[in-house]
Amino acid sequence: MTRRGVREFLATKTMRVAVYFVNSLVFLMIIGLLLKSRPILEQHTLWEMLSSDTWRPLRGQFGFFPFIVGTIEITLLSMALAVPPCLLAAIYLAEFARPRVRDALRVVIDLMAGIPSVVYGLFGVIIIVPMVREFGLLLGRHTTGYSLLAGGIILAIMVVPIITSVTTEVLLTVPVEARESTMALGATRWETVKHVVLKQGRQGVISAIVLGFARAFGETIAVMMVVGNVAKLPHSVFDPAYPLPALIANNYGEVMSIPLYDSALLFAALILLVVVGGFHLAAHLTLTRLRRGE
């Protein structure tokens, strides 16, 4: 084998090992969390922990149902608030905005993506929480403002740059010839976007929404600062909630003297990992079926 061939062989092997190593990290994390969650799983059934709404660690009662419901409701609320305006903004940037305007607006969107979570949290405490409190009073609901709605609004703001940027890039990759041929047949600009551009770019749009969902589901600091952190089942958007990431961040390392508490928090981390992983897998399978035209 020549020297060039040896280099190519070593480079290929090195890259393959790197790929296997990166992929193995997820499995290592799952195994580690499973081992650490084992003590609580040996004393409580999985159904008991997932379905119970009683959270009393001092009495050995670890019901995750309010945290799971709070996490899901905040995430779905944020996506309901964020996805429609993000798609419309991406369509405008890709199809209707002038290049100079598009570049200027994308700089602002990219800047939003780089803002630390704690800054969004402070913005939520100063602006969003009082707004939610006043809005609740207008509707006759007494609320402190630290609520499910405040968490959903903050998360919606945080996922805007992800969904908008990725969707814009996807729409810009649709060939110009597809637009021109459709408009040559008499279709309007909006009809071309609706029936051609969005149809060809739907896989990428779904990927953008999945990325935004994953960011919203796992976000910790900003949500923790505005959601109230009360371990009760929320009955309306004005009630406080306690998502799983906030539970872990608030308590891990501080109350480890309570039996099974560390195991319970690591089990919460395992739930987060499994749910996000499952959603990504479902999205991947959906995209694969779309590519195959099924």
Image: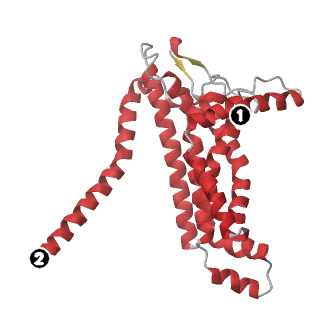
- Where residue 234 appears, as percent x and y from the top left, is 71, 28
Amino acid type assigned to the residue bearing label 1 in the image: Ala
Left or right of residue 120, residue 39 in this image: left
2 or 243, nearer to the observer: 2
Q: Earlier in the sequence, mark 1 or mark 2?
A: 2
| Vertical order, 227 against 112 (above or below) | above
Image quarter for residue 87? bottom right
Marks 1/2 in contact by CB < 8 Å: the verdict is no
For label 1, count other residues whose C-alpha is less than 10 Å away and answer few (under 14), some (14-19) or many (20+).
many
Percent across and percent down for residue 24 are 33, 49
Give the x, y percent position of residue 223: 62, 33
- Quadrant for the N terminus in the image: bottom left
Q: Is residue 242 visible?
A: no
Element type where label 2 sits in the image: loop
**Relative image position of residue 152 (x, y in whole percent):** 69, 39
Amino acid type at circle 2 is Thr
Q: Is residue 62 above or below residue 74?
A: above
Colouring scheme applied when the structure was drawn: secondary structure
| Residue depicted at x 51% and y 27% | 249
Label 1 belongs to which residue? 150
